[in-house]
Each structure stands twice: as structure tokens, then as C-alpha cells.
């Protein structure tokens, strides 16, 4: 049974930092990527960053480029997201995703390209 569990969310002032973790268990098949998504109240879920299962080829949303860093530790079965210089607009529930089944770069950060999801962790950034 596939299971993803996020941790590390919290509340910080603008300009602060947080580090999220996602611990994975189970077999994802021949999935080639894992990703972080977020969803703010009243908004659609959006891709934040994704990485291949070798830990390379990261792809970031323009809104987080240069501030967020995604990484994967296969030995620990854990996906990370380090978030620096946080802004109030980064406030959202952050989700870990696995089981990528898309094709092409344009699908790598789309919610519909992933089969498995964690329950999410809340990130709140105050101004």
C-alpha cells in the first residue's frame, strides 16, 4: 500500500524559512518523478516543484524559483522542500505527490499527472 506523509509545516513571519519532509512507503511502480504541490483557500492546487527519482532534473514554478529547493533522499525514502524568503502568498496546504504518469516536461508539475498523495501540511506566512 502506497503511503505518503508530510511534516514540517508551521507558521512563520514573512522572510522566514521552513523545511518540509515527505516520507514515502510502498511501491510506486516505475514512477519517474515526485513532486510538491500547494493549495490555498479558494484556489486550485498548483505545482510547486518536482524532481526525478534519481534526485535530479528539478522543475520549479516561477513563483518559487530561487527561493525553494527540492531534493530526494532515496536511502531514507524522503522527499524534501526547503523554503526560504517566504511570502504571505506562499500560505497554503502543501502536498507531496508520487506515482508520476505524465509525458513531457509540461506535465511534470500538473496535479493530474500524479497518482498518490499525502494528506498535506499547513504552511502559514504572516505579513
Image (tube, grey):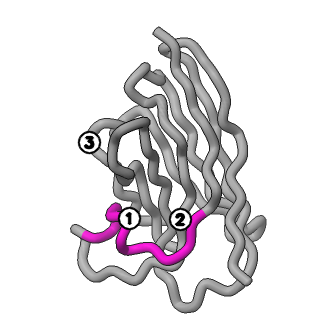
Disc 1 packing (10 Å; few <14; some 14–19; many ≥20): many
Residue depicted at x 51% and y 51%: 70
Callouts 1 and 2 close, C-beta under 8 Å: yes
- Residue linked to disc 2: 97
- Residue linked to disc 3: 62
Disc 3 packing (10 Å; few <14; some 14–19; many ≥20): few
Foreground: 120 or 59?
Answer: 120
CA gap between label 3 and label 2 equals 19 Å
Q: Which mark is on residue 111?
A: 1
In the rendered image, the residue lying farthest to the front is 42
Foreground: 72 or 99?
Answer: 99
| Image: 38 above or below 26 | above
Q: Element type at marker 1?
A: helix
| Image: 29 above or below 54 | below
Q: Earlier in the sequence, mark 3 or mark 1?
A: 3
Q: Earlier in the sequence, mark 3 or mark 2?
A: 3
Callouts 3 and 1 close, C-beta under 8 Å: no
**Viewer-nearest of labels 3 and 1?**
1
Residue depicted at x 54% and y 46%: 94
CA gap between label 1 and label 2 equals 8 Å
Start-end of magenta stretch: 107-117
| Residue 96 drawn at (x, y percent) | 56, 58
| Residue 73 drawn at (x, y percent) | 67, 63
User: In this view of the protein, can residue 14 be seen by the observer?
Assistant: yes
| Image: 92 above or below 71 | above
Residue depicted at x 54% and y 72%: 98
Q: Element type at marker 3?
A: loop
Amino acid at each position: 500500500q502506497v503511503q505518503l506523509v508530510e511534516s514540517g509545516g508551521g507558521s512563520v513571519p514573512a522572510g522566514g524559512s521552513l523545511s518540509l519532509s515527505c516520507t514515502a512507503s510502498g511501491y510506486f511502480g516505475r514512477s519517474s518523478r515526485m513532486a510538491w504541490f500547494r493549495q490555498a483557500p479558494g484556489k486550485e492546487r498548483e505545482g510547486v516543484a518536482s524532481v526525478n527519482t534519481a534526485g535530479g532534473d528539478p522543475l520549479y514554478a516561477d513563483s518559487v524559483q530561487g527561493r525553494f529547493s527540492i531534493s530526494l533522499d532515496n536511502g531514507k525514502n524522503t522527499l524534501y522542500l526547503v523554503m526560504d524568503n517566504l511570502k504571505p502568498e506562499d500560505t497554503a496546504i502543501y502536498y507531496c505527490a508520487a506515482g508520476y504518469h505524465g509525458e513531457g516536461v509540461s506535465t511534470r508539475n500538473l496535479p493530474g499527472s500524479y497518482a498518490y498523495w499525502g494528506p498535506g501540511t499547513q504552511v502559514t506566512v504572516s505579513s
